[in-house]
Image (tube, rainbow, N blue to C red):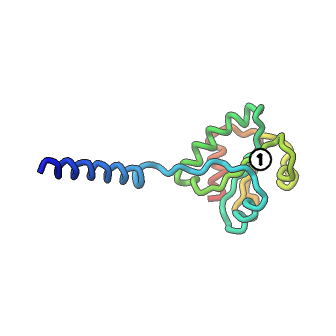
């Protein structure tokens, strides 16, 4: 009988742990993915909120933006925003296509329409307000 009670207790503990992990913990938003023209156009066609983050490894403003964007991406209000990252120092057509001339630039889309843009903004409140325009 004690063996059955031990099994029952372990089963209930496992069930509670699963329920907590599944239903009570906040969802982990996907990190920004490398910019891909095809994936970007697909997200636009699907009418999604899209944030393009133009960064450079040496950029101090980009370094200050990163934790803000990661934190906001975990919030339920913004966890569905599709994030693309463009490396300012890498060759490619993204910068020209998006008409970006500087690192630390954030470009926000709602479907196919650009709804906001900022450069060198490192304030949580204004980045939050910007994202709210697309969700």
Q: Position of residue 20 (x, y in %)?
A: 37, 50
Q: Position of residue 131 (x, y in %)?
A: 65, 52
* Relative side of 54 to 68, left or right: right
Residue at the image position 62 percent from the left and 38 percent from the top? 67
User: SS at mark 1?
Assistant: strand
Residue 25: tell me if it is visible.
Answer: yes
Q: Position of residue 113 (x, y in %)?
A: 75, 63
Query: Is the residue 87 above or below the residue 132 in the image?
Result: above
* Relative side of 27 to 86, left or right: left
Residue at the image position 57 percent from the left and 53 percent from the top? 79
Residue at the image position 72 percent from the left and 37 percent from the top? 62
The mark tally for this picture is 1
Residue at the extreme bottom: 45
Which residue is tagged 1? 86
In which quadrant will I find the C terminus?
bottom right
Residue at the image position 35 percent from the left and 49 percent from the top? 17
* Relative side of 26 to 20, left or right: right
Query: Is the residue 112 above or below the residue 17 in the image?
Result: below
Query: In terms of image quadrants, where is residue 90?
Result: top right
Q: Position of residue 117 (x, y in %)?
A: 76, 50
Badge 1 crowding class, 10 Å Cα cut-off, few under 14, some 14 to 19, many 20 or more, is many
Query: In terms of image quadrants, where is residue 134?
Result: bottom right
Residue 111: tell me if it is visible.
Answer: no
């Amino acid at each position: 009988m004690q063996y059955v009670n031990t099994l029952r207790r372990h089963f209930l503990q496992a069930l509670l742990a699963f329920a907590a992990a599944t239903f009570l913990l906040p969802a982990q938003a996907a990190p920004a993915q490398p910019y891909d023209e095809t994936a970007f156009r697909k997200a636009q066609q699907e009418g999604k909120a899209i944030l393009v983050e133009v960064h450079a490894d040496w950029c101090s403003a980009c370094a200050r933006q990163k934790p803000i964007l990661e934190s906001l991406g975990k919030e339920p209000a913004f966890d569905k925003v599709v994030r693309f990252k463009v490396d300012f120092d890498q060759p490619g057509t993204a910068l020209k296509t998006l008409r970006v001339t500087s690192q630390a630039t954030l470009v926000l889309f709602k479907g196919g329409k650009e709804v906001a843009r900022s450069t060198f903004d490192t304030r949580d409140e204004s980045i939050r307000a910007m994202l709210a325009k697309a969700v």
